[in-house]
Image (cartoon, rainbow, N blue to C red):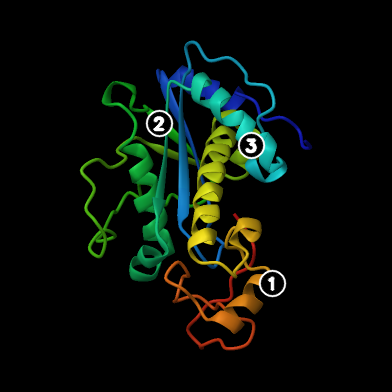
Amino acid sequence: MSGKAPTLRYERSFLTEGHRFLAGCDEVGRGALAGPVSVGLVVIDLAAVKGLRGVRDSKLLSAPERVALVPKIQRWAVAYGVGHASAAEIDAIGLMAALRTAGNRAWSQIPVELRPDAVILDGNHNWLAPASQGSLFDAAETLQVSCDAPVHTRIKADLQCLSVAAASVLAKVERDRLMVEFAQEYPGYGWEINKGYATAAHRAAIDELGPCVEHRRTWRLGSTAAGPDMPAVEIGG
């Protein structure tokens, strides 16, 4: 394990605004070539929450460390959820709308009585609940519940804020589990190892086997053929 431990310092600043329930939110899978984008949401009670040893941004932890933390995070939080948007949905509605879809699926798992007064979202763009919602869901399922709490974006929140780091761990473990299951259904791409990210071996497998239904068809996939409208995607969150 490495990296400075995240704290509750920023979360506790929301007490001065009269908030009690606060959610940390983070996504994983944004930069993958295959599989879903996944969004974790962890709700804490600012009036009672204490620190949680061992939690870091999911990228700083080994797979066994992340898995071991899941039950601890679930006991520590007053509520939590993980939502996904599939590769087909990413192709149909675009990445930002898919992130919002996944985030609101996570939000819908939170009991009404524990719905957060505010959300801390990692990054600098509010894809979870933009002020102008437009028609993001026109091509996707219309959710019965959508995030209506104020969203506070914060760069590097996954490194600094304990609730956001905890959310990243839940999302990463669940998405990794899905990718291992997909690897059994669609062997040859190495998803049990690369989890759908753009490794050289993964791109080479796509060259050889072609893409499958769990690949994001609108993205540049193989190492050779790339249409002019297909974005190059690097390994990332």
Secondary structure at badge 2 equals: strand
Residue 94 seen anywhere in this rendered image of the structure? no
Looking at numbered disc 3 in the image, what kind of residue is underneath it?
Answer: Arg
Quarter of the rendering occupied by the N terminus: top right
Query: What residue do we see at 63% from left, 21% from top?
Result: 52
Q: Could you tell me which secondary element the residue under label 1 belongs to?
A: helix
Of callouts 1 and 3, which one flags the residue occurring earlier in the amino acid sequence?
3
Q: Look at label 1 and name its amino acid.
A: Ala
Disc 3: which residue: 66
Helix, strand or loop status at disc 3: helix
Amino acid type indicated by mark 2: Ala
Q: Is residue 226 left or right of residue 216?
A: right
> For the view shown, which residue lies furthest in the right direction?
2
Classify 10 Å Cα crowding around label 1: few (below 14), some (14-19), many (20 and above): some
The mark lying in front, picked from 2 and 3, is 3
| Of 141 and 215, the residue lying toward us | 215
- Which tag is nearer the camera, tag 1 or tag 2? 1
Q: State left or right for residue 65 relative to residue 13.
A: right
